[in-house]
Amino acid sequence: MITVKVPATSANCSVGFDTLGLALNWYSSITFEKSDELLISGCPREYATADNLVWTSFVFACHKCGKPVPNVHIGIQSDIPFARGLGSSSQCVVAGILGANAIAELEMDHDQLLACAVEIEGHPDNVAPALNGALSVTVEGTRSLIGVNLGANGWKALVVIPPYEVSTPMARKALPEEIPLHNAAMQAGRAMLFEYAWTHKDETLLFEACHDLLHEPSRSKLIAHYPAMQEIAARNSVPFWISGSGSTMLFVSQNKDTLQALKEEIKNAHPELDVRLSEVSEHGAEVIHG
């Protein structure tokens, strides 16, 4: 039996639209065991079908390598919410590919695994940290994907999850088709500041860098709790962004006590929100044999 542990992720990290993503120390556990027929357990019955994303990713990886697809029993254990901006689809994709790589002996190396995951997912900002851990920046190079791991560097996260979904197609539809040249220049500068602040553990500078002009102005309108959370972030000078396409939002800090205080404030004012303290994880997906 193979067990694949995959972290939740936060993508589009503020000014890093479609390029920056980080891993959280909040893991799904998905098992693979050869079987006489396809079996999927641990998820709602409507998802335990041949359309399940773990299975379709497993099949895709086998076909990609020209190997036969073995039947397996897939067991899913996860409390990471679906369609909330925490990389639930990327966890399925990465688990399926890694499960296939182990069970079907595909012998894909890391770069091939990442490329395969991006081909399925469509963009790298969730699958890269799911594979690599920490904060990953991934872009398309002239010949292949270029990825850099910027480390976890002691950053902690406060994950704020509203009781409603924002689907990725809905969030994509909300994006502007064009942006002004000035905004593009500001975004590029803030992205460089973000990288410097992250690696140098400079929370004050990271707060200044976290003012996105590409997607948050549009997507924030889809999240009813965004104005209240953004006001808390501004008042406390804590870096803050929409996680993925939402509806989850993320505060980050070097200081756990800072985030604990914010957690108590948010829970008192908004008891309907699921608020969870976490850390940025150095570790990405792990394959465990036996």
Image (cartoon, rainbow, N blue to C red):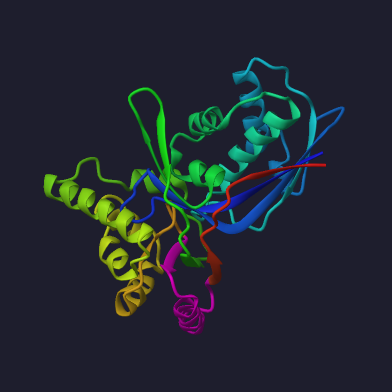
Residue 52 in view of the camera: no
Q: Residue furthest top?
A: 66
Report the residue at 49% width, 33% height from top. 118
Determine the residue positioned at 60% across, 39% down: 94
Quadrant occupied by the C terminus: top right
Q: Is residue 58 above or below residue 290?
A: above
Looking at the image, which residue sits at the far right?
A: 36
User: Could you say where residue 90 lies in the image, as x and y percent from the top left?
Assistant: 55, 43
Q: Which residue occupies 44% across, 63% down?
A: 249
In the rendered view, does 175 fall on the left or right side of 75? left
Task: Give the quadrant of residue 238.
Answer: bottom left
Left or right relative to 275: residue 27: right
Region rendered in magenta? 248-273
Image spot of residue 196 (x, y percent): 30, 56
Q: In the current view of this chain or complex, which residue is farthest to the left?
A: 182
Q: Residue 275 location, x and y as percent? A: 54, 71
The reply to whether the magenta stretch includes residue 260 is yes
Vertical placement of residue 119 versus 223, above or below: above
Left of 15 or right of it: where is 36? right
